[in-house]
Image (cartoon, rainbow, N blue to C red):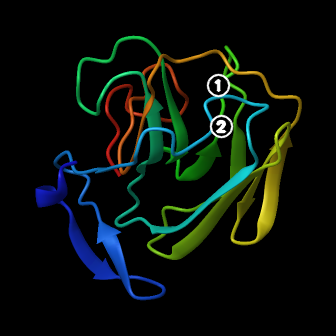
Amino acid sequence: CSSDLISFAAGISGQAFSFDGTQSPYVALPPGAFPPQPGSAAFTFETWFQTAGGNGGVILGQQAVAPYATAQGGWSPAIYVGTDGNLYVEMFYSGSISQLVSQTRVNDNGWHHVAVAYDGTSEIAYLDGVQIGQLKSLTQVPNGSPLSYQLGTGYTQGWPATTGGWYTF
């Protein structure tokens, strides 16, 4: 974890992590934080986020290597704010990009809430309490094992509306 590069700021309720987007801060999640593939246990991921100055970046990243290592194997920026300002969600990569994308920009300096609910077969994404889409009958192409998950950065080569490298929030 790059905790020395992460600060705290006022959040919706108490303190929030503050990523400046210019260095390489992230918060590593423990191995096994998410089911490795569709068909596993149900879960929900949710968080509040706020961008500054029209910026974006990866909120939740997944890849086969530790953050900022040479990207080898697979990677999936599971939840990110794209360079176009929209929110992109795809928790499970199926071999081709099939994202849920917001129709409104979220890089507006305002606080937004994202929730992704997975019931064992379908994934539904919500932005500020409104459903933005659903992916059904999910299959996943394994990105590697073990997978590294983190908040605040992710590798994005080949993904729409990204920088094509490590895209820091």
Between 144 and 95, the one nearer to me in the picture:
144
Residues at marks 1 and 2 touching, judged by CB atoms closer than 8 Å: yes
* Three-letter code for the amino acid on which mark 1 is drawn: Tyr
Q: Quadrant of residue 123?
A: top right
**Which residue carries the number 1 mark?**
93
* Disc 1 crowd, CA 10 A, few/some/many (<14, 14-19, 20+): many
Vertical comparison of 54 with 101: above or below:
below
- The spot of residue 130 in percent (x, y) is 80, 67
Furthest toward the left, the residue is 4
Q: Which of the labelled discs sits on residue 90, or is there none?
A: 2
* Three-letter code for the amino acid on which mark 2 is drawn: Glu
- Label 1, secondary structure: give it: loop
- The spot of residue 93 in percent (x, y) is 64, 25
Vertical comparison of 110 with 78: above or below:
below
- Label 2, secondary structure: give it: loop
The residue drawn where x is 23% and y is 24% is 69
